[in-house]
Amino acid sequence: MTAKLACMEQQQAELVAQLRAELRECQAAKAAEVGQLKEQLAEIAEQLRQCQRIVVELKAEVHHLRAGQVSSAESSNDVEVPAAPSAPQPAAAEVAHAHAAAAAAAPQQAAGGAGEAPASGPAAGAHALQAAAALALAGAGSDEGADLANLMEGSHISETPPSSEAPTHISNTVLSGAVGPQLAAVQPFKPAAAAANRRRRPLRPCAALSVDQQPPAAASRDLSHETDVVIIGSGIGGLCCAALLARYGYSVTVLESHYLAGGAAHSFEIQGYSCDAGPSFFAGLSGPPGSSKTNPLKLVLDAVGESVECVTYNKWIVYQPNGRSFECVCDADAYAENIRREGGEEAYRQWKELEQLMQPLQEGAAMLPAAALRADPGIALTAGRFGPGLLKAGLVAGQLTAPFSALVDKAVTNPWLRSFLDLECFILSGMTAKDTICAEMAFMFGERHSGETTIDYPVGGSKAIVDALVRGIEKHGGRVLLRSHVEQVLVEGGRAAGVRLRGSGGSSGRPEVVRARRAVVSNASVWDTMRLLPDGTVPDDYRRQCMDTHRTGSFVHLHLGIDATGLPPDLECHYLLPNQWGNFEAPQNVINVSIPTVFDPSLAPPGKHLIHAYTAGNEPYEVWEGVRRGTPEYAALKEERSQCLWAALEKIIPDVRLRAELVLVGTPLTHERFLRRYKGTYGPAISAADGSFPGPGTPLPGLLRCGDSCAPGIGVPAAAASGMIAANTLAPVWSHWQLLDALGL
């Protein structure tokens, strides 16, 4: 028995030893597996950290694209972005960016301006005075060219408009909540700091980026309040109107649908590039206060004590279809010699004859500045202070309001010169000499022949101008509210009494309403303003005339960031490239090109150039009508219709496709969606042969207009002038008189 127990104990001990050995082996195996798993987990953790860093970078990029400077929307919202060229490109991809709302415009009437009346009541002033005033109204719009609002769009962007329920008040000192970074675009531009910040942010290859999130929203709050004047839209016309009204002492609220102020004149940032969305050709902005007596935008800036730092230059380049190129120099003698060189002696002789015919019109156009104009009988006093000048203007008023072709036909038969004059008109007004008002050309002739005017590029881009206007509004007690989409003009007791905003205010659930004690001024386009008015508030004929207003074509835009290595140092900032010499209104015939980094390298990362090329208001909307954004058809059409821009750029930089690192394409659908432009149009096409742009008055008491649907018409200075006229109309005549004194006019 003892032996048997001993044997059993031995077997048990061996079994325990065996089990322990197997356990140790299992533990060792498991330990090895755990080690491997730990290594794998460590690798996964590192990958997650990398992903998190990428997500942070992408969010930051999205923030820049959709919020801060990559603007979108006028008195409206949302955005899109890029399409690649057909030729091979190194990682050139579509990148989303959002656009800020542009409406330097307002409704207008058909020829004759029947039914106009300022919001304050009395009919617009005496016909003779208005005829004389036309020179300042139309002429003001000539010296900054025909650059228009544009914005880029891309096939990888969310189609959801940015929220309009989180309005934001711009402040130059405090940017509240999560929208602070978005509003950097409206802060004063600091060239050195801005350049340093951009250069700290490395340029990444332009790989496809999908933007499917909205920019940070501001805290929900009820914006309902009462003010003296509500202005719909923060385009140049609206901001100029607001700035002057604030200076006059009115409480003013500018309501902008998107999260960037400036409309067509804003800039946007993307991957270290700061792009002008629209206007890039300016004149008469530099110089101390009082240096300009005629430039409306400069006069508004002077009035509110603001200025814009500019780089001055004096020429642009024209590429002819025959392969020749020539300089257009802002100097009378140099300009004439260029015409002799390109058009021959006959063209030169006829040009000099045209100059003689234009001389009295130039003098008349210079005698009555837009700052003196208003749309009520008070114009008899404010314009009357110019005495002999007003008389001189009145003597040529009939010629000033006629088409420019009326003078051209008297002096010019040379085909080359006639086409060149048509090209000048088209760039200024979007129409040729037969439709362009002569006052606009007289103003332009006067500026070029004065020997005192410079062409200016604002340091920091067109955003610098918007910044200055916003500062001017705020320093005089006005407000610019972003993310504040106007849904409808309120009409009470037969007059415009304010506006209703989209969405509800805070937790109350009630519609947000901004009431206007004095007036509502629409800086939206003629077509879009009509859509804001309830049925029955204006006569049906008036509404129909406004909606039937003829329109110019639209645009295709190409924004590029390129490698500048090895490029010649003598690139110019502006180029004009017609594909055929004549018929400039033909689709895609005229191409504009701007390379602003020639003057302001801080607009791009080191070693890069920024380029903006676009068809100059001659892209047919009908080509795009019915095409759905974000579809393969849309992407293919963008590529196809942008080829003319690439071809034009290749005349300036032959290997531009290979150099491209950032590619953004915008279309008429972009204009239609983000700028709320009817059929993506550049603006109204009101021929001087048939009538004139209407003034600020409307048949609805309490509603005025400003922008490119009103006199003087299309263009930055013209929009600024329209804002001045609307503001002056609302101000007492004595206050207007004091403003003219302060401006030295």
Image (cartoon, rainbow, N blue to C red):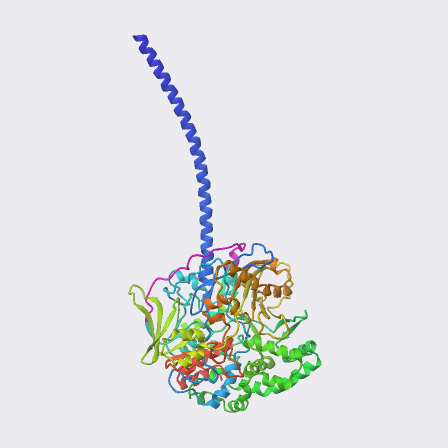
**Which residue is at a point 58% across and 88% down the rendered structure image?**
360
> From the viewer's perspective, is 274 left or right of 23?
right
Residue 384 visible in this rendered orientation of the protein: no
Which of these two is toward me, 434 or 118?
434
Task: Answer above or below: position of 421 versus 84.
Answer: below
Task: Answer above or below: position of 441 versus 220.
Answer: below
> From the viewer's perspective, is 587 left or right of 215?
right
Task: Answer above or below: position of 132 versus 639.
Answer: below
Which of these two is toward me, 416 or 103?
416
Q: Position of residue 203 (x, y in %)?
A: 53, 56
> From the viewer's perspective, is 308 left or right of 474?
right
| Residue found at the far front of this picture | 626
Q: Quadrant of residue 241?
A: bottom left
Residues rendered magenta in the picture: 197-224
| Residue found at the far right of this picture | 345
Q: Position of residue 321 (x, y in %)?
A: 65, 70
- Residue 490 falls within the magenta-colored stretch: no
| Residue found at the far left of this picture | 508
Task: Answer above or below: position of 171 versus 538.
Answer: above
Numbered disc total: 0
Q: Position of residue 211 (x, y in %)?
A: 46, 57
Which of these two is toward me, 155 or 308?
155
Q: Position of residue 273 (x, y in %)?
A: 53, 61
Q: Quadrant of residue 453?
A: bottom right
Name the quadrant of the N terminus. top left
Residue 519 visible in this rendered orientation of the protein: yes
Main structural element of the magenta stretch: helix, strand or loop?
A: loop
